[in-house]
Image (tube, rainbow, N blue to C red):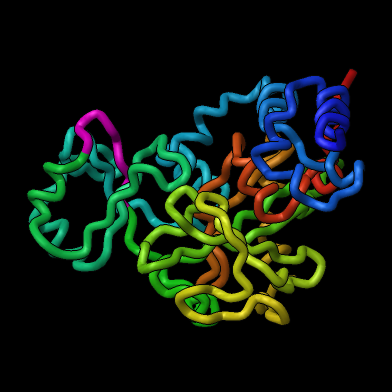
Amino acid sequence: EQIGREMKMLKDYWHCKPYHYVRYGLFDRNLTDDQLLDYIPSYYHYNFYADPLYADIDISLYNNKLSLYKIFKERGIRTPEVIAVVKNSELYSLQEKRLDVDSFFEKYNTTLFFKPVFGMGGTGILVFSKGSHTSFLASLNRRETYIVQCGIKQREDINKINSSSVNTLRVVTQYADNKARTCVCVMRMGREGRMVDNSHQGGLSVQINVADGSFYPYATAEHGGGCYTCHPDSGFVFKGSILEGWDKIKMLIEKSAVLFPELKEIAWDVAVTPDGIEMIELNLGYGIDHLQCTCGGMRRVLGIYPGK
């Protein structure tokens, strides 16, 4: 009876079928009606909130990693350098000049990340560190265009949380009245030796308090489930830990958001390095499921309420 009442309440409120009630296992949680309503159905979020938000924007410019890199450089935002582009398994410079393969790999004798320009959730990213670069290039999907970047050196305190991947921050900002506001922050961490931190690739996520930079007590694994009081590989304990320099990190992210006044809401992927922060990319159609699996319902946090 309670499940039936709650599902009807959610359907009536959001005006769509409450599949998220099952997605998040809300039937098995001790939540008030208001807390249940805080969970935004992904159907509503993408179709009735995000789509109208960017209706007058050519989002392909921001979804393409190569064009986004150029926009970042034009607006003076620190971001990992793109050192080459791969088309049809051939290497080119940013000026579309063909590169000598042997000379390139001799110059960049380090771990290299090959990212599909339209890739999402870490899907399709390939890492080259050793072996035959000729065979590696031949193994790339010839229908894909890739950007090539060197590995990022993250700050040592964050490296201690998990050293196999760069542990990035997913930060959502909203822009209004010529100001940017940080709404929510999550740190994403790799595990079991994986070199990417995306939840789709088995990573963990823990919420960071945007007021003071403190870690929430538990990290979650969105795909596969489970809550963790510490990182299962490094033993790093989340409760009582603070992200060093959070006030400056938040200020720099909000300064970046102000440079994109055409975008009213942005989900940033941020790396924290010894020299500050680097914006890996921004996301417009970001994963609301990832946020809600990690942080709980986002209705009041993001100010998303259903229309009639």
Answer yes or no: is residue 195 visible.
Answer: yes
Does residue 77 appear in the picture of this structure?
A: no
Q: Is residue 247 above or below residue 180?
A: below
Judge whether 215 appears above or below 64 on screen.
Answer: below
Image location of residue 121, percent across then percent down: 47, 44
Q: Residue 139: horizontal and vertical position, in percent?
A: 15, 43
In the image, farthest residue toward the top:
308
* Residues drawn in magenta: 141-148
Q: Residue at x 14, y 50 (%)?
A: 136
- Residue 142 in the magenta stretch? The answer is yes
Q: Residue furthest front?
A: 1
Quadrant (top left, top right, bottom left, bottom right) of the N terminus = top right
Taking the spot 15% from the left edge, 59% from the top edge, the residue there is: 105
Q: Quadrant of the C terminus?
A: top right
Residue 225 falls in image quadrant = bottom right
Looking at this view, is 19 or 188 the one in front?
Answer: 19
Asked if residue 289 is positioned above or below residue 232 in the image, the reply reads above
Q: Position of residue 283 (x, y in %)?
A: 58, 41
Q: Using the image as rendered, state which of residue 22 and residue 285 is in the foreground.
A: 22
Q: Residue at x 52, y 50 (%)?
A: 223
Q: Position of residue 291 (x, y in %)?
A: 66, 49
Judge whether residue 32 is colored magenta: no
Q: Measured along the vertical axis of the image, is residue 232 above or below residue 298?
A: below
Label count reads 0
Report which quarter residue 143 is drawn in. top left
Q: Is residue 40 left or right of residue 31?
A: left
At x 11%, y 62%, the residue is 131
- 231 and 109: which one is in front? 231
Name the residue nearer the viewer: 243 or 230: 230
